Amino acid sequence: MTAPEITALVLAAGQSRRMDGAHKLLATAKGQPIIRHTVENILRSRADHVVVVTGYDNKRLEAALHGLPVSFVCNPDYAIGLASSLALGITALDSSVDAALICLGDMPRVTPQVMGRLIAAFDPASRCAICAPTHKGVQGNPILWAKQFFPEIKLLSGDQGAKDLLRKHTASVMYMDMPDEPGVAFDIDMPTDLIEFQQSLL
């Protein structure tokens, strides 16, 4: 049986409005931009390809990932919300892709092992057409989506991502408890989150 082709789609187009003027993805921890920490973890996973959706400050983001084997898509409509980046990224995927691992650029604690477990569980012929991690009862990220859901993802709008689709397709979702992986529920949203991540690397 041929292994499914998985592309990781990294959403990195936002404006970091709650970071007191700083661009959180370009802030550094242990001398390296947050976005690079995130993407390097993804590259160490079992994903076949990595596509980064940029928008705000796209040139600096591309520079921060210089030398890494990733593709870029720039969302000119990044200001209207996360869904526009999701739709653009899904549209950019090759037709051969079987599933997209939707990753958030501000989640540098998501380990390659997390992504590997999601990919290993993926089985669109059963209930595992959507695979999502949980930690202590909290649904986290990234989430793996079978291509059968791509048309609906392209129709999303606003800033809520695909949460409504998860509720709509409950029967297709495999929630995977990961008690040893707190990173699936940790994102850098506020300056205090950045400080916490920086200190964790000391």
Image: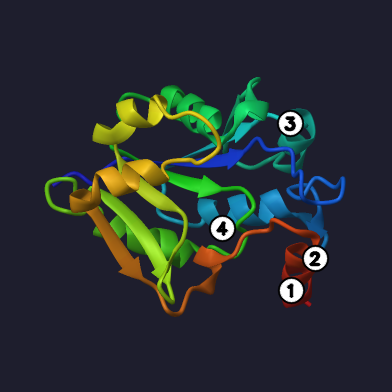
Q: Is residue 72 above or below residue 100?
A: above
Q: Is residue 97 visible?
A: no
- Label 3 sits on what residue type? Tyr
| Residue 187 x, y percent position in the rendering | 62, 59
Q: Residue at x 78, y 32 (%)?
A: 57
Which one is closest to the eye, mark 3 or mark 2?
3
Residue position marked by numbered label 3 in the rendering: 56
From the image, state whether disc 3 or disc 4 is nearer to you.
Answer: 3
For marks 2 and 4, give the CA distance.
15 Å
Q: Is 55 positioned to the left or the right of 145 in the image?
A: right
Q: In the rendered image, which residue does mark 2 sit on? A: 30
At a point 44% along the width and 66% down the height, the residue shown is 113
- The answer to whether the residue labelled 4 contacts the one labelled 1, judged by CB atoms less than 8 Å apart, is no
For marks 3 and 2, give the CA distance.
24 Å
The answer to whether marks 3 and 1 mark residues whose Cβ atoms lie closer than 8 Å is no
Circle 1: element type:
loop
Query: Which element carries disc 2, helix, strand or loop?
Result: loop
Q: Earlier in the sequence, mark 3 or mark 4?
A: 4
Residue located at (53% from left, 62% from top)? 110
Three-letter amino acid code of the residue under disc 4: Asn
Q: Which mark is residue 41?
A: 4
Q: CA distance from mark 3 to mark 1?
A: 27 Å
101 to the left or right of 19 = left
Instruction: Identify the residue under disc 1.
Output: 201
In the rendered image, which quarter is residue 137 located in? bottom left
